[in-house]
Image (cartoon, helix red, strand yellow):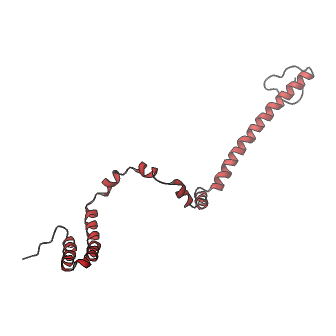
Amino acid sequence: MARRRSAFGGGIARALLVPAVTVVALPAVGLRRAASAAADRLVPVLASAVLSRLDLDAVAARIDVDALVDRVDIDRVLARTDVAGLARYISAEIDLPDLLRATAGTASSELTHGVRDRSAQADLVVAEAIDRFLHRAERQPGDRAHGPAR
């Protein structure tokens, strides 16, 4: 006749039975040591059996992450963080120097166009002032900004 295995595969029964027999057989003086030894053998087996049956996704869904984060001491986290190393890593990953060159180039180009436009407007204002000073006729749209009015 075949031997029937327990629902836990025999591991828990063995972990319970051997320490229990040991505890009963020892005098009261060694009881604490025997109980500790029994716990050392029993706890890992029970923990393994419980964890193998646990739905960790369901457990994780019940965790309030905001409450956990609220308990974090940010100053301690930052004190343990290599901020300079993190900055170097980010700079290398996003190629910060190239990004700055591209941005500066765009800004420089926009600034140059803005200065040219303002200069052209200033030229017109100066030309109109000189025309008034010299009593020249008003310029018409399309006339050149420099030189006497026609």
Determine if residue 144 is in view. Answer: no
Residue ranking furthest to the right:
134
- Side of 79 relative to 22 (left or right): right
Residue at the image position 59 percent from the left and 55 percent from the top: 94
The C terminus: image quadrant: top right
Quadrant in which the N terminus is drawn: bottom left
Observer-nearest residue: 31 or 58? 31
Question: Where in the figure is residue 88, as x and y percent of width and height?
Answer: 61, 60
Q: Nearer the viewer, residue 42 or 34?
A: 34
Q: Name the residue at 47% across, 54% down.
A: 72
Q: At which x and y percent is residue 115?
A: 77, 38
Does any portion of residue 16 appear in the rendered image? yes
Image position of 99 with respect to 2: above or below: above
Asked which quadrant contains residue 33, the reply is bottom left
Residue at the outermost front position: 29
* Left or right side of 65 for 145: right
> Given the current orientation, which residue lies at the most extreme left position?
1
Q: Height in image: 59 above or below 37?
A: above
Q: 36 or 45: which is nearer to us?
A: 36
Q: Quadrant of residue 108?
A: top right
Q: How many marks are shown on the rendered structure? A: 0
Left of 134 or right of it: where is 50?
left
Q: State the residue in front, 34 or 121.
A: 34
Q: Residue at x 63, y 55 (%)?
A: 96
Instruction: Name the spot of residue 125 as percent of width and height, x first.
Output: 83, 27
